[in-house]
Image (cartoon, helix red, strand yellow):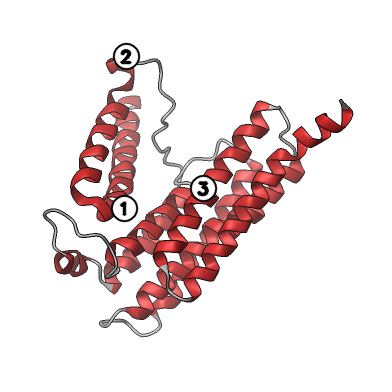
Amino acid sequence: MYIFTKIIRIIPNILTFLNLFFGCISVIFLQSKNFDKSAVFTLFSIIFDSLDGFFSRLIKNENKFGKELDSLADMVSFGIVPSIIVFLLLKSMKKKIPFIEWSSLFISIFSAYRLAKFNINTSYNGLTTPVNTLFFSSLSIAITPSSIPIFFVKKNIVNMFITPTSILFMIFFSCYLLISKIPMISFNFKGFSWKKNKIRYVFLLISTFLLLTLRTIALPCIIIFYIIISILMYFHRLKKSY
């Protein structure tokens, strides 16, 4: 019984190590600019990152060692990985600003700040590092030539909007969101009633429509939509409080 209990207690740490393991594989694939495979392993990192937290709460085994280990794994999977993705995207662009690719390192710096802050205060708001990584990872797939064709948005139109300047804006805006106090929408449904979950249902419906129509471009669009709704709701609550 004692051995079984010990095994159960180390499962969250094993899941954290898997998060780190897949994050490292993602970095390896990025060396050859294989954004598609890197995105797959980043998704595995996100899954195992969610599972380790869920399992820790389930067995009531949240401890300082687990928190520190989780932050170190997240720094690789959700700090270094997005920085490398953006670095490679900026470096490969034809119309580029000199040394602009080095601005991608701000993602790692602000991710580290957020993870350290979250270790002190678990109720910390702002954009989470996994969602931020998912955005840049899906963006890299959307703008690379190997992407699946979409229904009514041509590739050259997409590339018109994805410029060094627009990516630079994305970097600094995402860095701001990582350390901001803006609460992002929670997807913990309060029952199944429309009234209590109206925003969540609307978001899911629009997200489904975007996935069916935009395909590879859908995911970064959905995350942008998620951020916009969260910001609008935040300012709406502030307005009501005055």
Circle on res. 193:
2
Residue placed most toward the observer, 116 or 11: 11
Which one is earlier in the sequence, the residue at label 3 or at label 2?
Answer: 3
- Do the numbered discs 3 and 2 sit on residues whose CB atoms are within 8 Å? no
- Do the numbered discs 2 and 1 sit on residues whose CB atoms are within 8 Å? no
Which three-letter amino acid code belongs to the residue tagged 2?
Ser
Please, which residue is most extreme toward the left here? 152
Which three-letter amino acid code belongs to the residue tagged 1?
Pro
Which three-letter amino acid code belongs to the residue tagged 3?
Ile
Would you name the residue on which mark 3 appears?
Answer: 46
Answer left or right for 236 relative to 52. left
Disc 2 from disc 1: Cα separation: 28 Å
Would you name the residue on which mark 1 appears?
Answer: 220
Please, which residue is most extreme toward the right here? 2
**Residue at x 11% of width, y 54% of height:** 152
Q: Mark 1 falls on what kind of element? A: helix
Q: Is residue 32 visible?
A: yes
Which one is earlier in the sequence, the residue at label 2 or at label 1?
Answer: 2
Residue 158 pos. (x, y %): 19, 64
Q: Is residue 62 above or below residue 34?
A: above
Residue placed most toward the observer, 88 or 216: 216
Residue 66 pos. (x, y %): 72, 43
Which one is earlier in the sequence, the residue at label 1 or at label 3?
Answer: 3
**Residue at x 15% of width, y 69% of height:** 156
